[in-house]
Image (cartoon, rainbow, N blue to C red):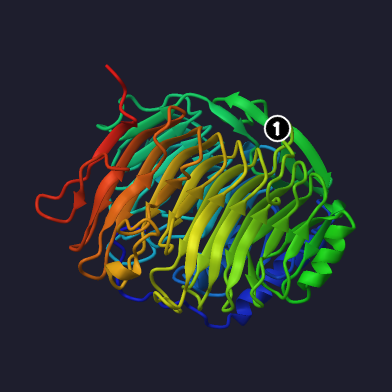
Amino acid sequence: MLRRSNSRLKSHRFACVVLAVFAVSSVLALAQNGQHGEAPDFGPNVLVFDPHMSSSDMQSRINSIYAQQQHSEFGSGRYALLLKPGEYKLDIPVGFYTQVLGLGASPDDVHVIGNVHSDAAIHNNNATTTFWRSAEGLSVTPTNGTMQWAVSQAVAFRRMHVLGDVVLHQNHGWASGGWISDSKIDGNVDSGSQQQWITRNSEWKSWTGSNWNMVFVGVRDAPAGDWPKPAYTKVRETPIIREKPFLQVDSQGKFSVRVPTVARNTMGYTWKGGTTPGRDIPLDRFYIAHPDRDTAASMNRVLLAGKNLLLTPGTYELAEPLSVTHKDAVVMGLGFATLHPVRGTAAINVADSDGVIVCGILFDAGPTLSPVLLQVGRAHTSMRHQTDPISLHDVWFREGGADIGKVEENLVVKSNDVIVDHTWIWRADHGDGVGWNSNVSKNGLVVNGNDVTVYGLFVEHHQQFQVEWNGERGRTYFYQSEIPYDPPDQASWTDSSGNKGWASYKVADSVKDHEAWGLGIYSVFRHPDVTLSHAIEVPETPGVHLHDMVTVALDNLGEISHIVNDAGAAATTRTPRVDPRLAEYPARQP
């Protein structure tokens, strides 16, 4: 998050009895509607809408949720709004910790005529703290022809069809996003003041705007121009991907989860033929967990028995890690379901098994230091998963903000062939429990496995390497990172080799093969006489290649002295400010 307001944003934590009644009544209304069958027990914070319901009733319930969630940056509310196939005349503002999800096999099965929009969370059209929300699986015909999606990190825009234009900002106020995938926009996408963005496997009529770092992977009609002016990084095809699983309902009212097929060398969205290729898992093969009555022990029992796990919205206080061991197991969160380890353990341990999927979950570190929040695989594994990879989608990590959180390493990937498809790994720079010795976190992402591929890697403010990559043949498509704001002095922030600070993106000296596209590293130092020697550190070896890099120093203190190793000019706050860029490392030979 760049250049956000320094004022502490207070959450709206007020009790909302009317809202709870609305939520329960919406589910009961559907249960009484025999035409489309009874909705599963998703709990009071999941509202399942049907096109036969009253538009005014649905709008009232949507407005009630938004009134609670609009400014609730660190509040406890978690909500999912599920829309069954059909047409709706609604205006749906999307607040904090709110997922809006169409339940059709295709986004065109659920059509909203009106709007689905995200608005800047703070004054002056500032969207740099507009986090933790999503719109997925809908078609939208926006009022006046333009859909506003002013967002920053941890915001998913997936399987969307916009019958009009999209703007990714609010009146050109600050914004620090963002993500689009598997989507079609009939008109123009205007990134405007967005500082960076990644789009994967999507199509549109046109794109306008660039700032520091815009990455397009597997995008038809990517905009003309190349790095550094405009700041466009274009990769023609997505080398390997499995789209995020999604909840759906058929004409008989039967719910299932579609698990998309792994695809290679793709361009454009998956649902051109009407549906996304894949397999369906009936909902009765999922255990539907509820935060008010499930524990880690109860969820582990069903996981061990071979059930998949669906986490309904809320916060789950974990006394032990969830253990995911079965081949092709799916652990899916609705409405930003949050895992909060309270005894210094991991939140989830994933075994080195084919095809495990973890998606749609917020990992919130607890007050006792955890070694890791999400660990995938085991050390020194030789197992391969080329045909059925483990994949992570929309997984978010946080230390501090809501309360004190402590962890050594947030996400550790030890398995081979893993796909990470959009993550934000954040040590909080504002909110409650924030301080150099309070919300402690050494590393954001540590990769020890080989052939790991990451799309949309956002990692910020950790106290040593933001990313430490030890595995071979790693691939990163888009990287956004702010180094920590709050090192109190240089002595407190000097790496083991004596360099000033810890590089944001570190590829281990032993690595022979690594490649990354579109990397932006930024500084916002709060204390004087603190600098970073190298934004990126990589071994000098023929198999390591980096493309399109930028560093930016913000506010009025410090600098980033080099972009990669000792290459690249300093990003400094001195006037005139310099935002250095490198197109290639090592530089291409003439």
Mark count: 1
Residue 537 location, x and y as percent? Answer: 38, 45
Q: Does the rendering let one see residue 93?
A: no
From the image, tell me which residue sits under label 1.
386
SS under mark 1: loop
Residue 588 location, x and y as percent? Answer: 31, 23
Residue 551 location, x and y as percent? Answer: 28, 47
Q: In front here: 441 or 470?
A: 470
Query: Seen from this angle, which residue lies furthest front?
Result: 497
At label 1, counting other C-alpha atoms closer than 10 Å, the crowd grade (few under 14, some 14-19, many 20 or more) is some
- The quarter of the displayed image where residue 454 is located: top right
Q: Quadrant of the C terminus?
A: top left
491 over 421 or under it: above or below: below
- The quarter of the displayed image where residue 541 is located: top left
Residue beneath the point at 31% across and 75% down:
7
Residue beneath the point at 77% across and 65% down:
289
Q: In front here: 240 or 276?
A: 240
Q: Does the rendering let one see residue 459?
A: yes
Residue beneath the point at 37% across and 58% down:
1
Residue beneath the point at 62% across and 81% down:
17
Q: Is residue 81 left or right of residue 215?
A: right
Amino acid under label 1? Gln
Query: Seen from this angle, which residue lies furthest top?
Result: 590
Q: Is residue 511 left or right of residue 326?
A: left
Residue 312 location, x and y as percent? Answer: 71, 64
